[in-house]
Image: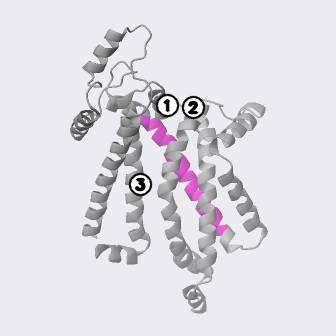
Amino acid sequence: MGRYVLKRIGFMIVTFFVVVTLTFIAMKMLPGTPFLNPKLDPTQRQALMHEYGLDQPLAIQYVKYIWELLQGNMGTSFQYGNEEVTTLLFQKFPVSMNLGFEAIIIGAILGTLLGIFAGLHRGKFLDWGSMIFSMLGISIPSFIFAGILQYFLGVAIPLFPVAGWEGASSHVLPVASLAVGVLAEVAIFMRTEMVEVLNQDYIVTAKAKGLSKNAVVFKHAVRNALIPVVTILGPLTAAIITGSLVIEDIFGIPGIGDQYVKSIVTNDYPMIMGTTELYAALFILTIFIVDLLYGVIDPRIRVSGGHN
């Protein structure tokens, strides 16, 4: 297992630097420069480009950036008064992380429960109803749900604030907007796996041995059905992280999304790189955690992984 973990960590490091490299190249292809202030004359603009090393060849800029990154320095933001990028990220990221984790946890738990009940009642009303809801949840984008919830639960029936991020009540609508998609996808996967697992020979054997229905369902069926569900949590987490950028804008949430969008518009290179690196690191770390969870859910995977 230790060898497997070390290999995964090595893969994570390589993947991260591939993302950094591709982002750096794509960023430099953006039109314009960070210094488009009409008050600056060409001489001043050129002086600023020289000061920040933006007039140097791309290869030199890249090597210098990687060297600084390895020392934990992401540079200073052009649009936020030369503040450190790491400082800006740490100020705003907790809000975005809170929003994403609340949506993932609520969506995953409710989706798992809905999928279990749908699988146990295959072909019945609960099964059909839950699957129709899940298909709608997957088909409709989160920002559409956001608008619907804002109108019906924020305006027509003013139960929750339509914007902001102060107090528990202000979390309800944005978290629900993001959680619906997670709930729907997890429910469909869980239902499919439950139906398949319940028809396996070992489940029939467990029933024949006289095990109670709860023991068969939760000790055997649910445990094995969870493995494919865990697989999709990594991509779902990435989707929630990126999807939260739009939700933050709709609900006026002071997270990292607003900074990221503005950094692209203003060609704030250090902020673009820092935010992308943060998202990439979270995604890669999530995939790593999912791999480790395989071993917790199914020890056979942990044993086989240790011999790779």
- Circle 2 SS class: helix
Q: Residue at x 41, y 34 (%)?
A: 29
Q: Position of residue 59 (x, y in %)?
A: 26, 37
Around disc 2, counting alpha carbons within 10 Å, would you say few (fewer than 14), some (14 to 19), or many (20 or more)? some
Eye-nearest disc, 2 or 1: 1
Q: To which quarter of the image does residue 58 belong?
A: top left
Q: Residue at x 51, y 75 (%)?
A: 224
Q: Position of residue 15 (x, y in %)?
A: 34, 53
Q: Amino acid at mark 3?
A: Thr
Task: Say whether marks 1 and 3 touch (CB < 8 Å).
Answer: no
Label 3 sits on residue: 286
Label 1 sits on residue: 261
Which of pointers 2 and 1 lies earlier in the amino acid sequence? 2
- Nearer to me, 115 or 47: 47
Magenta-colored stretch includes residue 212: no
Q: Which residues are magenta?
A: 93-117
Q: Residue at x 57, y 80 (%)?
A: 216
Q: Residue at x 37, y 30 (%)?
A: 269
